[in-house]
Image (spheres, rainbow, N blue to C red):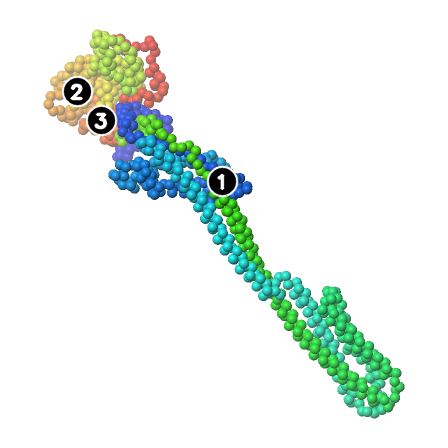
């Protein structure tokens, strides 16, 4: 841990772990706190058993109601229909489950008399409603589930009451369905009859409206449009002919007026008369009757191309043409007779007078014709305007007529549909009266239940077991989450600036094995190692006591724990190879983490296996423990050495014949000033460095002693001992921050679950059949 992390006090958040690793960790946590888990399981089973005994029994009776389809095929007779079966059943269910029906059942069978007296009728009705269960039975199809039957059941503590109430509910369902079907067909017939009468009245009103419209606008209807257009064309042709005739007659009138005016200028002289007669005689005057005849012939040709001979205008033109031809023939006869008379001067005056009279008479006729033609022209124009207005109004009248006809057609279709539906309704009504329509009937009567439905003892026991197990898991993991600890090597390695020297598995000291000092037996300890216990006589002879039984490096040299101590000692030796003497402080955050055991095993391994001259110094003056591992535990210790009472050689005690010496704390009389003693220790450390290659300081826990900080300043290496699954993470990290970065800090994770360690380490601990873990001590 660097200085910045120490000062800021930020706790390192390790990365997330794979799911299998997390599951294994949870399982080890549960196994470690197995008594909580077992207690929760036992509590769940006990509670479930009590519920099975205490809960009241409930019997459920059921009946099955079959839904029968219409007996006559729907191709011949269609039923009334209405809502589908599910909707009808829902409606019937609501009616049967109403307060009125349920009240009658309570009065008749009295299933909840006690509850009625205690809580009232409403509470009993609600309970009865909850105990009734209605379900539909059918087969799934492409359009959903088809309802084929209805299952009705009722639960009660008395099986006979349950059966009677179920029978009553089934009969109510059948009765309500019959009543609803009869009411439906009757109401449908009456409704259709009323609707049919209303539709007939509306249809008659619409028929009268169409008739009145056609009578009023007969000349403007769409079917008269073609006739109006033909009439308009005929009138246009007639107008053109009339206009041309008027122009021709007007020209003739002008000619007559000019001739008469010239005749009046001549005197009644012979010479003059002869001169006058000669121009008149020689002048060629075109007869207006002939012009009129030609015009009428043109009109006749035009009309004959369009109409038949029986057309009125054709007949009129033919009569007028015949009359003109007769008049022209008469005029020719008169002129011819005049030419045959002798040319005499005596008769010349008379002839002139007759010609003048004839001209005047013809001019009057022309004037009359022009007047008649102009009146006719005005009438034609008036008729054309009227017909044009009719043609212009035809689309509007057509739209109005289409609306009327469309409404009439819709009303007629509605009337026909209602008429057909009324006929079907009457047939369906007869079908229901003869009970040939859709019916429901009871197929399976209500049964008398023999076994209680509730309580379901198997389910309760399973739920109790699962609930107890779940509670146990929750409590176990909850406790572990509320107080997180370091359990595996990987959790410590992620801390910044911390190096893990070794992971010591949990092992069972030989002194704690019940048969270790009594008879030989082969056991496998908590660390996965195999131990061979000796009898009491041999153990005493070899130096095995209950106090030094934790020296696993000596008594179980081939165990996983001993191998891990060798790995830690090797790492320390390699990292401090350049130093002549190294001071290693062994400390922990809390008491009971295995600090003293680690000091003894690590120092013993360093001396015996690596051949380093090692001194173990007990600096824990409050709870000294190293003297238990000394060959002569009653010797003077550090306190006496610092006071100058004994020499260094008199205070040292060895472990076996290995170069590992112990400097115990010594006897403490009265109060001990630890800080002063540590300052005194500082003065003799140079001497100790000259005699020993490794000095291991067994210090008190960091969070419970003020002297650790001073001891840290004396050390070259700091080795933390962390009890896996015991030391809270926040306290361990707080202890790291207390010491800071005075020296290099390393960790030995103690009492680790052997199953959480690497598989190759676990395999290394598998013993051979001929191995003996407790060998003859030299």
Pair 3/2: label in front: 3
Q: Which quarter of the image is occupied by the N terminus? A: top left
Residue 707 screen position, x and y as percent: 18, 27
Crowd band around label 2 with a 10 angstrom C-alpha radius: few (<14), some (14–19), many (20+) = many
Q: Which mark is residue 590?
A: 3
| Residue that label 1 marks | 436
User: Of the residues under marks 2 and 1, which one precedes in the sequence?
Assistant: 1
Pair 2/1: label in front: 1
**What residue appears at the point 22 percent right and 18 percent down from the top-left corner?**
615
**What residue appears at the point 42 percent right and 43 percent down from the top-left corner?**
179
Q: Which mark is residue 665?
A: 2
Q: CA distance from mark 3 to mark 2?
A: 20 Å
User: Of the residues under marks 1 and 3, which one precedes in the sequence?
Assistant: 1
Residue 583 screen position, x and y as percent: 24, 22
Residue 143 screen position, x and y as percent: 49, 39
167 on left or right of 546: right
């Amino acid at each position: 841990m660097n200085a910045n992390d120490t000062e800021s006090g930020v706790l390192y958040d390790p990365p997330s772990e794979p799911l299998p690793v997390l599951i294994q960790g949870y399982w080890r946590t549960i196994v470690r706190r197995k008594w909580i888990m077992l207690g929760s399981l036992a509590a769940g089973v006990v509670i479930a058993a009590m519920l099975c005994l205490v809960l009241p029994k409930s019997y459920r009776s059921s009946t099955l109601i079959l839904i029968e389809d219409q007996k006559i095929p729907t191709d011949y007779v269609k039923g009334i229909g209405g809502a589908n079966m599910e909707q009808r059943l829902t409606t019937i269910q609501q009616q049967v489950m109403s307060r009125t029906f349920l009240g009658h059942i309570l009065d008749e069978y009295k299933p909840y008399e006690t509850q009625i007296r205690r809580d009232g009728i409403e509470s009993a009705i609600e309970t009865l409603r909850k105990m009734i269960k209605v379900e539909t039975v059918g087969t799934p199809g492409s359009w959903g589930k088809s309802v084929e039957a209805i299952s009705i059941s009722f639960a009660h503590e008395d099986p006979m009451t349950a059966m009677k109430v179920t029978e009553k509910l089934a009969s109510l369902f059948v009765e309500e369905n019959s009543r609803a079907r009869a009411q439906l067909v009757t109401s449908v017939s009456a409704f259709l009859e009323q609707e049919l009468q209303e539709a007939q009245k509306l249809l008659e009103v619409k028929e009268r409206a169409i008739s009145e419209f056609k009578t009023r606008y007969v000349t403007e209807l769409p079917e008269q449009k073609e006739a109006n257009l033909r009439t308009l064309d005929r009138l246009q042709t007639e107008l053109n002919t009339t206009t041309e005739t008027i122009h021709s007659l007007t020209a003739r009138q002008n000619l007559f007026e000019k001739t008469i005016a010239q005749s009046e200028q001549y005197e009644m002289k012979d010479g003059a008369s002869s001169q006058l007669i000669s121009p008149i005689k020689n002048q060629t005057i075109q007869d207006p009757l002939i012009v009129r005849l030609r015009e009428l012939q043109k009109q006749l040709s035009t009309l004959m191309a369009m109409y038949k001979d029986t057309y009125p205008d054709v007949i009129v033109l033919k009569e007028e043409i015949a009359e003109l031809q007769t008049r022209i023939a008469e005029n020719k006869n008169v002129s011819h007779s005049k030419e045959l008379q002798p040319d005499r001067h005596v008769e010349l005056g008379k002839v002139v007078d007759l010609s003048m009279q004839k001209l005047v008479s013809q001019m009057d006729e022309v004037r009359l014709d022009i007047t008649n033609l102009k009146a006719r022209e005005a009438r034609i124009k008036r008729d054309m305007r009227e017909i044009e207005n009719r043609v212009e109004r035809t689309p509007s009248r057509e739209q109005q007529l289409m609306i009327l006809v469309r409404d009439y057609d819709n009303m007629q279709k509605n009337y026909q549909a209602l008429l057909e539906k009324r006929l079907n309704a009457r047939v369906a009504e007869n079908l229901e009266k003869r009970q040939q329509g859709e019916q429901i009937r009871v197929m399976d009567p209500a049964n008398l239940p023999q076994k209680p439905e509730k309580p379901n003892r198997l389910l309760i026991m399973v739920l109790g077991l699962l609930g107890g197990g779940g509670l146990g898991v929750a409590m176990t993991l909850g406790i572990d989450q509320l107080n997180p600890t370091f359990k595996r090597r990987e959790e410590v390695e992620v801390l910044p600036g911390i190096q893990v020297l070794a992971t010591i598995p949990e092992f069972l000291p030989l002194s704690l094995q019940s048969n270790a000092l009594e008879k030989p037996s082969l056991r496998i300890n908590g660390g996965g190692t195999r131990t061979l216990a000796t009898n009491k006589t041999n153990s005493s002879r070899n130096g095995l006591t209950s106090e030094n039984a934790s020296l696993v490096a000596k008594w179980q040299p081939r165990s996983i724990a001993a191998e891990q101590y060798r790995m830690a000692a090797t790492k320390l030796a390699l990292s401090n190879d350049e130093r002549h003497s190294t001071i290693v402080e062994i400390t922990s955050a809390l008491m009971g983490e295995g600090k003293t055991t680690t000091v003894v095993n690590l120092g013993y391994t360093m001396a015996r296996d690596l051949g380093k001259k090692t001194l173990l110094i007990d600096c824990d003056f409050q709870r000294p423990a190293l003297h238990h591992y000394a060959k002569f535990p009653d010797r003077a210790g550090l306190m006496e050495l610092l006071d100058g009472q004994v020499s260094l050689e008199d205070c040292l005690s060895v472990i076996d014949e290995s170069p590992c010496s112990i400097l115990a704390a010594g006897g403490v009389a009265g109060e001990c000033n630890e800080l002063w003693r540590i300052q005194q220790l500082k003065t003799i450390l140079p001497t100790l460095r000259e005699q020993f290659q490794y000095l291991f300081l067994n210090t008190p826990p960091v969070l419970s002693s003020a002297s650790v900080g001073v001891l840290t300043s004396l050390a070259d290496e700091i080795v933390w001992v962390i009890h896996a699954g015991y030391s809270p993470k926040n306290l361990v990290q707080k202890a790291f921050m207390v010491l800071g970065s005075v020296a290099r800090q390393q960790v030995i994770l103690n009492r680790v679950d052997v199953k959480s360690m690497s598989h190759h380490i676990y395999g290394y601990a598998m013993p051979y059949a001929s191995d003996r873990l407790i060998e003859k001590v030299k």
